Amino acid sequence: MERPETPGVRRRRAGLYRRHWRHGLKNENKTCRYGTRLHAWRAGASVFDNSPHRAKLPLMHLLIVEDDATIAEYIQRGLTEAGHSHDLCDDGRHGLGLVVQGNYDVVIADRLLPGLDGLSMVKAMRQAQCQVPVVFVTSIGGLNDRVEGLEAGGDDYVVKPFAFIELMARINAIARRPNINTEQLILKVADLEMDILKRRVTRASTVIDLKPREFAILEMLMRAEGRVITRTMLLERIWEFNFDPQTSVVETQISRLRAQVDRPFGQPLIHTVRNTGYRLHATA
């Protein structure tokens, strides 16, 4: 007959799971694929471990693109315990369709996927102007592989085996970043409007054709609406000069910009601040 488990034994067992969770996998090759973390999870320990970070996380809707059922279930359980909603698919092509058409805060994706690999999926997302953050969770962990994943458009890279609390901390860090939304991609001052993605400028519904450098100067002025942009700031940002070339290159470009943005429309938006720089704002 099996002896009943005493409260002391239960406390010691719970402590063992927590230690395994906190310290991670030390003898991965001597255990199973996910080592002590998976043993604890299968025995009923919390994936999220009721960490104090849990209360600080914003509620999010995530997409998991993972074809390994065990890993997918592990991530799903952690997200559910943390209070987040999620969708799951096991195919890269299906995942691409979901994220482009859906409304997700973060995508968690493997690289080795059927249909379309994770790297190609993220590249296709970025080509479709889909800026949803992506965290790769994969067994491909070489230095060049990690660099390749980030340069393809990934926002973070987690190598298997992993602890869910680390994955959640990385997702939380992404959630704290300012959102890149349409308000930031479409700038507007008075009747002057700039579409950053389409590289299109209009004023009073009239299209203004700007050269790349003129566009960059105007974008800098519009983003700093009402604030002074100095000549030195323009030289460093637009021309990448860390010194004053002692030429009138800035003044020449501003004059050309005014000829297209201000003069045909009567009301000037680009104003000179004597001995300082320039400010873009609508006069009352």
Image (cartoon, rainbow, N blue to C red):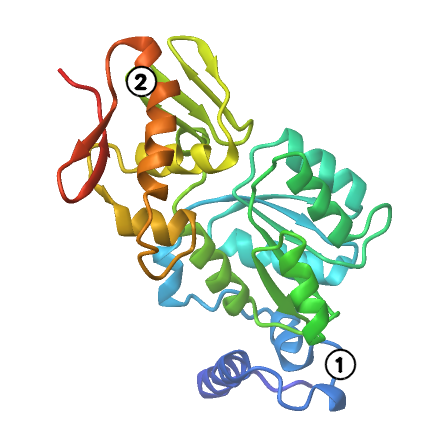
- Name the one closer to the observer, 31 or 40: 31
Q: Is residue 11 visible?
A: yes
Q: Amino acid at mark 2?
A: Asp
* Residue 32, numbered label: 1
Asked which quadrant contains residue 283, the reply is top left
Q: Residue at x 65, y 66 (%)?
A: 147
Percent across and percent down for residue 11 are 45, 83
Determine whether the residue tagged by mark 2 lies in a helix, strand or loop. loop
Percent across and percent down for residue 107 are 61, 48
Mark 2 Cα-neighbour bin, 10 Å: few <14, some 14–19, many ≥20: some
2 or 1: mark nearer the eye: 2
Identify the residue under disc 2: 262
Q: CA distance from mark 2 to mark 1?
A: 69 Å
Asked which quadrant contains residue 98, the reply is top right
Q: Is residue 119 above or below residue 101?
A: below
Q: Amino acid at mark 1?
A: Cys
Percent across and percent down for residue 263 are 31, 14
In this rendering, position of residue 230 left or right of residue 5: left
In this rendering, position of residue 17 left or right of residue 215: right
Q: Residue at x 56, y 41 (%)?
A: 131
Say whether disc 2 or disc 1 marks the residue closer to the N-terminus: 1
Q: Residue at x 59, y 44 (%)?
A: 86
In this rendering, position of residue 4 left or right of residue 189: right
Looking at the image, do the residues carrying marks 2 and 1 touch, with CB atoms under 8 Å apart?
no
- Name the one closer to the observer, 119 or 51: 119
